[in-house]
């Protein structure tokens, strides 16, 4: 069966904008976040407190948080890789963070400058201190299906990394298909290998056009939290060949068609995507935005 309701975890301001060639002005980002909340989003991943030289597109994280008017009932998580990032997040009143691990050795080095093992030494004090401050901590695992350097990722390796993050006290684990190579059978096998789907979320990049099919497979396997980005923008600058996330509008079209509630207003989402595409100077990759948007 399918869930009655799905939480769409919007990553456009973070995953979406981190991979744009141009740096988007901070006031445009603040308007983007406000529009997403107005369209019904209840969780908006807003920015990252990573090293500003590693992701210059999000170097204005602190400034952005002072400009975002936080609405009651809306969560505004931010990515935090290490204690320096946590200090910066705490200074700005952040209530929810997300740590992000790699399932593979090569990507741990490329994205975090750590080994597969030593990434945990970086996250452990972050999660412990964040929980001590009463924050909610989400965790990602990247390269859950395959890695551009190592090929397909063994399911057991993903489960081992993911369980360690959940055991630290993270409330949710988002399974990242960073380069979009996963297919539905692999999705079902991975979710099944975790046993309990209740703390799992899925994060599909749409590089190979599999994101919607993979999402449907994940929903049938018991997942109820799905990551997506406005207009399908995004990608990780440290993952070769990564393109945009599953587009929020494509996801919402499918969910509403299936009778699954999201609390989102599709027309507002499409309008925001069209506005953002104009700001970015390129059309949205989303098929639904192309079909419904007026440009
Ligand atoms: P490092 O060079 O090993 O850092 O980078 P370090 O710990 O050695 O520190 C070096 C210097 O950087 C120090 O300054 C630190 O203070 C400073 P110094 O003492 O030399 O003057 N520093 C910082 N400054 C500001 N904020 C910070 C910070 N940390 C250190 N947070 C590090 C390690 C993790 C920082 C770096 O590798 C990094 O920032 N990586 C982030 C890369 C990234 O953001 N990738 C994209 C997000 S992940 C993604 O997109 C995948 C996802 O969507 C899921 C999926 O699709 O699969 C989540
Ligand atoms: Mg991603």
Image (spheres, rainbow, N blue to C red):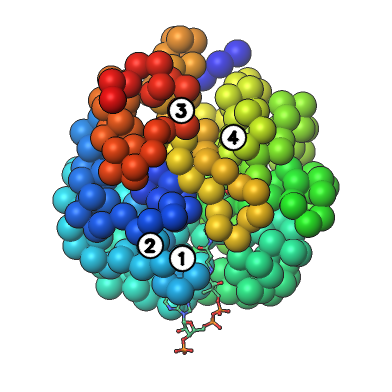
Task: Find disc 1 in the rendering and name its residue.
Answer: 55
- Label 3 and label 4: CA atoms lie apart by 10 Å
Occupied quadrant, residue 101: bottom right
> Residue 221, relative to residue 131: is it above or below?
above
Q: Residues within 10 Å of mark 3 (few under 14, many from 20)?
A: many
Q: Is residue 52 left or right of residue 243?
A: left
- Label 1 and label 2: CA atoms lie apart by 6 Å
Closer to the N terminus: mark 1 or mark 4? 1
Point out the image quarter for the N terminus.
top right
Q: Say how many tags the image has.
A: 4
What numbered label is drawn on residue 58?
2
Q: Is mark 1 within 8 Å of ligand 1?
A: yes
Label 3, secondary structure: give it. Answer: loop
Label 2, secondary structure: give it. Answer: helix
* Label pair 1/4, CB-CB below 8 angstroms: no
Label 1, secondary structure: give it. Answer: loop
Q: Residues within 10 Å of mark 1 (few under 14, many from 20)?
A: some
Closer to the N terminus: mark 2 or mark 3? 2
- Label 1 and label 3: CA atoms lie apart by 24 Å
What numbered label is drawn on residue 206?
4
Q: Is mark 3 within 8 Å of ligand 2?
A: no
Q: Is mark 2 within 8 Å of ligand 1?
A: yes
- Label 2 and label 4: CA atoms lie apart by 22 Å
Closer to the N terminus: mark 1 or mark 3? 1
Task: Find disc 3 in the rendering and name its residue.
Answer: 286
- Label 1 and label 4: CA atoms lie apart by 21 Å
- Residue at x 63% of width, y 55% of height: 239
Q: Residues within 10 Å of mark 4 (few under 14, many from 20)?
A: many
- Residue at x 65% of width, y 28% of height: 210
> Residue 28, relative to residue 87: is it above or below?
above
* Label pair 1/2, CB-CB below 8 angstroms: yes
């Amino acid at each position: 069966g399918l869930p009655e309701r799905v939480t769409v975890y919007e990553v456009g301001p973070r995953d979406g904008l981190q991979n744009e060639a141009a740096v988007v002005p901070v006031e445009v980002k603040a308007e983007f976040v406000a529009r997403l909340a107005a369209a019904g989003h209840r969780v908006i991943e807003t920015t990252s407190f990573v090293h500003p030289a590693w992701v210059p597109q999000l170097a204005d994280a602190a400034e952005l948080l002072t400009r975002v008017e936080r609405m009651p009932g809306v969560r505004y998580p931010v990515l935090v890789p290490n204690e320096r990032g946590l200090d910066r997040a705490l200074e700005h009143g952040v209530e929810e963070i997300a740590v992000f691990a790699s399932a593979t050795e090569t990507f741990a080095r490329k994205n975090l400058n750590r080994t597969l093992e030593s990434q945990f030494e970086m996250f452990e004090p972050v999660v412990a201190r964040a929980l001590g401050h009463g924050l909610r901590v989400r965790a990602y695992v990247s390269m859950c299906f395959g890695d551009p350097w190592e090929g397909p990722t063994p399911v057991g390796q993903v489960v081992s990394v993911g369980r360690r993050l959940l055991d630290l006290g993270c409330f949710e684990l988002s399974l990242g298909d960073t380069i979009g190579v996963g297919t539905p059978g692999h999705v079902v096998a991975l979710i099944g290998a975790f046993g309990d789907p209740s703390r799992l979320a899925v994060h599909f990049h749409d590089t190979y056009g599999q994101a919607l099919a993979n999402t449907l497979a994940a929903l049938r396997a018991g997942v109820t939290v799905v990551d997506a980005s406005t207009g399908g923008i995004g990608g990780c600058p440290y993952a070769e060949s990564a393109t945009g996330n599953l587009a929020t509008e494509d996801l919402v079209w499918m969910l509403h068609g299936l009778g699954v509630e999201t609390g989102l207003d599709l027309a507002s989402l499409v309008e925001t995507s069209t506005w953002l595409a104009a700001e970015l100077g390129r059309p949205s990759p989303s098929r639904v935005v192309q079909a419904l948007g007026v440009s």
